[in-house]
Image (spheres, helix red, strand yellow):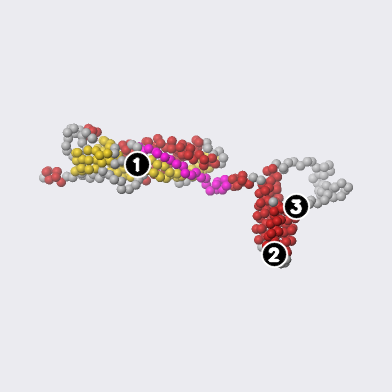
Amino acid sequence: MALMDFIKKQFIDVIQWTESADGVLSYRYPMQDMEIQNGGQLTVRDSQVAVFVNEGVVADIFGPGLHTLSTRTLPLLTNLKNWDKMFASPFKSDVYFFSTRLQLDRKWGTPTPITIRDKDFGAVRMRAFGIYSYKLADAGLFYKEISGTRDVYTVTDLDGQIRNTVIAALTAAFGASNVAFLDMAGNQGLLADAVKKQMEPLFARMGLGLDTLVVENVSLPEEIQKQLDTRIGMNMIGDMNRYTQYQTANAIPIAAANEGGGLAGMGANLAVGMGIGNQMAASMAGIGQQQPPAAPGGGMGGGGAAPAPGGSPAPAAAASPVDDVMETLEKLHGLVGKGILTQQEFDTKKAELLKKLA
């Protein structure tokens, strides 16, 4: 009966692993009740490592190549089992294969904005995302610290841990860099290097080696981005007076096309816009200086214009160029309504008048 049980027992002569899917870091060779035949062949391919584990203890580690399993090639396992060096019987041991190739294009990002202190905007909430790559550097340490006795361990099992670690390192690196957010676009490489430097010891603790880390984008929340766009637009305007004239020229045809407003309403809106624009231009140009003191007798309560020499009232202020243009346009528009002028003739004349304002 014992002889029949021995004959029925299965032995393993060849141990090997071919990766059937991407992203597998650790694979446990299916042993079940089978035993490894002394003198069996172990095939470890490039970018692989094989680890023999005896009763939960890492016994031997094999790199790429073809290995014949014997007391000579399994010194640690032989010592653990207290076998004589000439043993010829089969043995049992858990065998784990680990992939040591680069795991590329792993993505990281901030699921919610992180709060950082910026010297331009103060405390702001920032988003960032990018990619990283890594590979297994120490199979024994990875088995002890991460994968354990699981049949399969994949890169997706690590993604959450690594992503949160990257975000913590990013927050610390951004705070220590003292680089303004507006300058960060040109310094994303330096930020990535700082984050990678902080991440490397954390990867090493897991038996991994961080190869690359890239910061692809950093951005602000939408409401702060709008304020930033407004600031950039104001810096691009430069000459406020020319900007006001440009806005006026664009507003005239829009108002003329508005049936409800008419040219009269357009003129009122234009005058208000020109007045505000002139005040802003004067303030920015530094011409809003203190006026000279009033002539004797011209106090706040006198009211009215100061008399001109000879006792006659001062002449009224001359009409502004805008008023002249608006008056002319209104008259021409009336001629269009009466059929005296065509719309094309009116548009041509209007363009000439608006050109004078510019």
| SS of the residue under disc 3 | loop
> In this view of the protein, can residue 318 be seen by the observer?
yes
Which tag, 2 or 1, sits closer to the chain's start?
1
* CA distance separating discs 2 and 1: 78 Å
Q: Position of residue 115 (x, y in %)?
A: 50, 42
- Give the residue type at disc 3: Ser
| SS of the residue under disc 2 | loop
Q: Quadrant of the N terminus?
A: top left
Q: Which residues are magenta?
A: 207-229
Kindly indicate whether the residue at mark 1 contacts the one at mark 2 (C-beta within 8 angstroms). Answer: no
Which tag, 1 or 3, sits closer to the chain's start?
1
- Give the residue type at disc 2: Thr
Give the label, 1 or 3, closer to the camera: 1
Give the image quarter of residue 205: top left
Give the label, 3 or 2, closer to the camera: 2
Query: In this picture, is 195 found above or below 221?
Result: above
- Give the residue type at disc 1: Arg
| Residue 210 sits inside the magenta stretch | yes
> In this view of the protein, can residue 123 be seen by the observer?
no
Q: Which residue does the numbered mark 3 point to in the structure image?
A: 320
Q: Position of residue 288 (x, y in %)?
A: 72, 43
| SS of the residue under disc 1 | loop
* CA distance separating discs 3 and 2: 28 Å
Q: Is residue 349 left or right of residue 302?
A: left
